[in-house]
Image: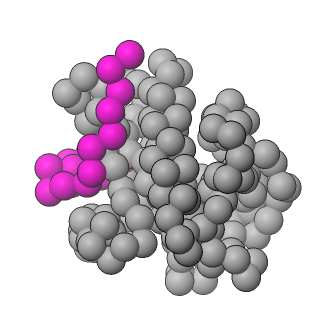
Amino acid sequence: MDVRLEPWSEFALDLLRRINTPRMRRHVGGPEPEDLLLARHRRYLEMPAAGRGCMFAVLLGGEMVGSIAYHRRDWQGEQIYETGWNVLPAYQGRGVAVAAGTALIATVRELARRPGAPHSLHAFPSVENASSNALCRRLGFDLRGPCDFEYPPGSGLVMRSNDWHIDLTGPG
């Protein structure tokens, strides 16, 4: 399967709009209005320059079929990398998320070797999101248990999530 990660670009705005549906965003508060979607797109474009992470478009062949990211954040007093993903419905169940997740984990393992870099990667899918929780297990994350998780950060909105964890210092 020809799955690649491409850093977020202006061309990915259409993908972000295709992800912004009730079905795709049911576990994270629903679709966003256009102004918030455009602000999200700008944040994604600015992530690498800020040195906090990177959003990627997931390509199958040459077509954008999803997104995946990593970024630094403080979690329970520790600096960590966090990841999250989306795969458009027509491409779900075909191994795209597994391939994208595997590529992202390899990228973040390399980053974790840098001085001062976080040494763990976490994912926080809703406890009700069976497919994302299954993907975490398949990718080798360890389940730390349920937690209250603010999403989006700074919004004050709290969702019940599972805290999945990978130790980036161990064998990959």
Q: Is residue 81 above or below residue 15?
A: below
Question: Residue 25, image x and y in percent?
Answer: 49, 52
| Residue at (67% x, 53% y) in the render | 169
| Residue 108 versus residue 101 in the image, above or below | below
The image quarter containing residue 32 is bottom left
Q: Position of residue 92 (x, y in %)?
A: 48, 26
Between 164 and 125, which is closer to the camera in this rendering? 164
Residue under the point 37% across and 60% down: 54
Determine if residue 130 is in view: no
At a point 48% along the width and 58% down the height, the residue shown is: 111
Residue interval drawn in magenta: 1-19
Q: Is residue 103 left or right of residue 35?
A: right
Coordinates of residue 70 in the picture (x, y in percent):
47, 58
Inspect this view and state whether residue 136 appears.
yes
How many marks the image carries: the answer is 0
Quarter of the image with the N terminus is: top left
Which of the pair 98/158 is nearer the observer?
98
Q: Is residue 18 magenta?
A: yes
Nearest to the observer: residue 48 or residue 24: 48
Residue 69: image quadrant is bottom left
Residue 69 belongs to the span the image colors magenta: no
**Please, which residue is most extreme toward the left here?**
11
Residue pictured at 50% horizontal, 65% vertical: 114
**In this figure, which colouring scheme has been used for the structure?**
one colour
Image quarter hosting the C terminus: top right
Q: Position of residue 130 (x, y in %)?
A: 70, 37
Q: Nearer the viewer, residue 79 or 42?
A: 79
- On the rendered structure, is 81 left or right of 147? left
- Quadrant location of residue 60? top left
Q: Is residue 145 left or right of residue 112?
A: right
